[in-house]
Image: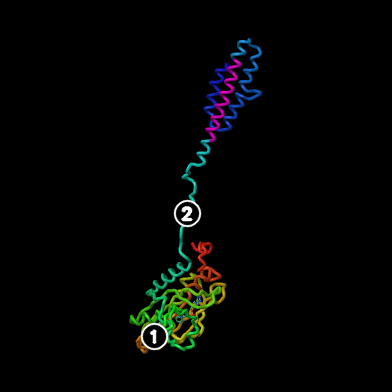
Amino acid sequence: MSVEQLRIEAIKEIKEASTQEACEKVRIKYLGRKEGKLIEVLKSLKDMSVEEKRTIGTAANELHQLLEHELEEKIEKIKRSEEEKKNRFDVTKPGKRIASGHLHPLTKVDKEVRTIFSSLNFTIVEGPELEKETYNFDKLNIPAGHSARDMWDTLWVKKEGTNGLLMRTHTSPVQARYMESHNPPFQIIVPGRCFRYEATDASHEINFYQIEGLMVGPDITLANLKFIIETFFKKFFKQKIEFRYRPSYFPFVEPGIEVDIRLKGGKWLEVMGAGMVHRNVFDGVKYNHTQVQGFAFGMGLDRLAMIKYGVPDIRLFYSGDVRFTKNFR
Ligand code: FA5
């Protein structure tokens, strides 16, 4: 085969080679030291005339250089296109997950509680966090000097005779506020933030949330309280629950009770204070206590969230640590 024919053939094959391996095969076929086609041409030179040796030898050397150059270029080209392929946007690949925001677990529980009570026909009412002493205490049958004031460690903002200002220690003051401007029958819940001047621990914060409940009408009894509470907890925990009612004391209810619940396989947990509204509270808001009765309850929203999500320490909710909150997507 002439050098020229070899050139045409080899160039054609280099053009057709689409991988690095294919290029290597072409290189061995034409430039291989042992059996390469060009070596064969050089071997055959020994039987030729001096003139032929010179022209064919030179042509063979030039072809060698040419093919090496062509192969090198082709391999570079293949490498470049492989690199491009790797970097190309592949629409068939699964997408990257974009980190999106989500609600705080306490906000979730708050929303859920509101939804359940709304479905039971309760109206949602709110009241001020900075509260007058009279609403937080006096109108709830806890006059100045009453030892029951010690039940609530209070953050006072202003002490002024009996007209002090404080950060409300519970949501119960909204009971009096609402009754002063509304007539029974009604049923409300009051979700809201409360403050207590206490040492914090796994179940106590200086700032936490409560949900107050109040239902007043001509013939409301403890049986209504029991029904509403049990319906609420069953809807909230979506499982069978055991209930325990213990006598307790809060100045604004009579009788006063404490409600415990037990979830499947768990232990008894105290979840709320409750009772029948005290006649002194009705008298204070100018209701006729011979004509109306009512029940009230107050529960800790943080405690509900702790039970629901198995959170061991209330302080985690307020830590601002996203490693904690991101568990509640
Ligand atoms: C009260 O605050 C009453 N106002 C509840 C009430 C309302 C009784 C209506 C009767 C009628 P108590 O101090 O027990 O009660 O608080 C109620 C709930 O708030 C507790 O069961 C607990 O879940 C939550 N709680 C109280 N203190 C803290 C605190 N420091 N940190 C977190 N949660 C708290």
Per the picture, the main secondary structure of the magenta-coloured stretch is helix
- Residue numbers of the magenta segment: 56-79
Image quarter where the N terminus lies is: top right
- What amino acid does circle 1 point to? Gln
Could you say where residue 174 lies in the image, as x and y percent from the top left? 40, 79
Verify CB contact (< 8 Å) between mark 1 and mark 2. no
| Mark 2 crowdedness (10 Å alpha carbons): few <14, some 14-19, many ≥20 | few
102 is higher (above) or lower (below) than 28: below
Nearer the observer: mark 1 or 2; the answer is 2
Q: At x 52% / y 28%, what residue is drawn?
A: 16
| Residue 70 shows in this picture | yes
Look at mark 1 in the image and give the residue it sits on: 293
Q: Quick one: SS at disc 1?
A: strand
Q: Earlier in the sequence, mark 1 or mark 2?
A: 2
Could you say where residue 81 lies in the image, as x and y percent from the top left? 51, 36
Q: State yes or no: residue 262 in magenta.
A: no
Whether residue 153 sits left or right of residue 39 in the image: it is: left
Question: Quarter of the image holding residue 143?
Answer: bottom left
Q: State yes or no: residue 73 in magenta.
A: yes
Look at mark 2 in the image and give the residue it sits on: 98
